[in-house]
Amino acid sequence: MDEIINRVANSALQVFDLEDYFPKQPIVELDISQWLFGGFILKEAEFREQLKAHDWTQYKEAYVALHCSEDAILPAWAYALVSVYLQPYALKVVNGSGKDLLLSVYQQTLDQLDYSGFKDKPVILKGCSNKPVPQELYVLAVQKLVPVAKSLMFGEACSSVPLYKKK
């Protein structure tokens, strides 16, 4: 029998998997409507009292997305005040959805990566993931990889779509 050779493992092909950078810390969507009168009216004194009484330690080392699930008209300071209480505990706080939070965390992570290991090499941007990696991040990853890679493909080594090839 002939020996089976894994040509992908023996090639210069580098895999860039966005799932490798998925946050390990908890991601929490915090709905501030819980502190509104009737779920949609902000009464400042009551709002402040409820924030003081809330257990903020539960957000220690978590990423927090602040949002309001009700169609309430809120002053800008409402979100700012909640973020003051979160600041000593949360790793990062954004005003928006969990997806907005993921985009922000990934943006920060991808901006800090060293891409020199991909210089002048064929790179495959892994397309399958078991975690909820937002589609927008593939565009961001391409912007980071194109300046350094020899070529860029999307998908898996066995079935990839060419995206870019350095001339």
Image (tube, grey):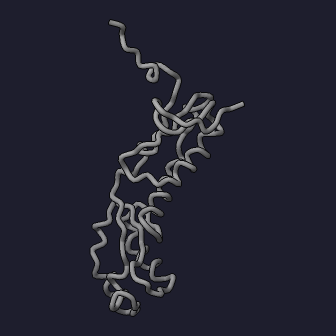
* Rendered residue at 49%/82% (across/down): 77
What residue appears at the point 43 percent right and 52 percent down from the top-left corner?
A: 133
State which quarter of the image contains the N terminus: top left
> Which part of the image, by quadrant, shows the C terminus?
top right
Q: Is residue 112 left or right of residue 40?
A: right
Q: Quadrant of residue 150?
A: top right
Q: Does residue 60 lie above or below 34 as drawn? A: above
Q: Is residue 8 left or right of residue 46?
A: right
Q: Is residue 138 left or right of residue 42?
A: right
x, y percent for residue 126: 47, 39
Q: In the image shown, does 48 or 143 lie closer to the viewer?
A: 143
- In the rendered image, the vertical position of residue 51 relative to residue 37, given as above or below: above
The answer to which quarter of the image holds residue 55 is: bottom left
In depth, the one of 4 and 82 nearer the eye is 4
Q: How many marks?
A: 0
Q: Is residue 105 visible?
A: yes
Q: What is the x, y in percent for residue 33?
A: 36, 82
Q: Position of residue 21 (x, y in %)?
A: 43, 46
Residue 107: tell me if it is visible.
no
In the displayed image of the protein, which residue is found farthest to the top? 1
Please provide percent x and percent y for residue 140.
57, 50
Query: What residue lies at 32% left-to-right and 87% top-to-bottom?
Result: 49
Placement of 152 over or under 40, stated as above or below: above
Quarter location, residue 3:
top left
Q: Residue at x 39, y 78 (%)?
A: 69
Q: Relative to the observer, which residue lies in front, 52 or 145? A: 145
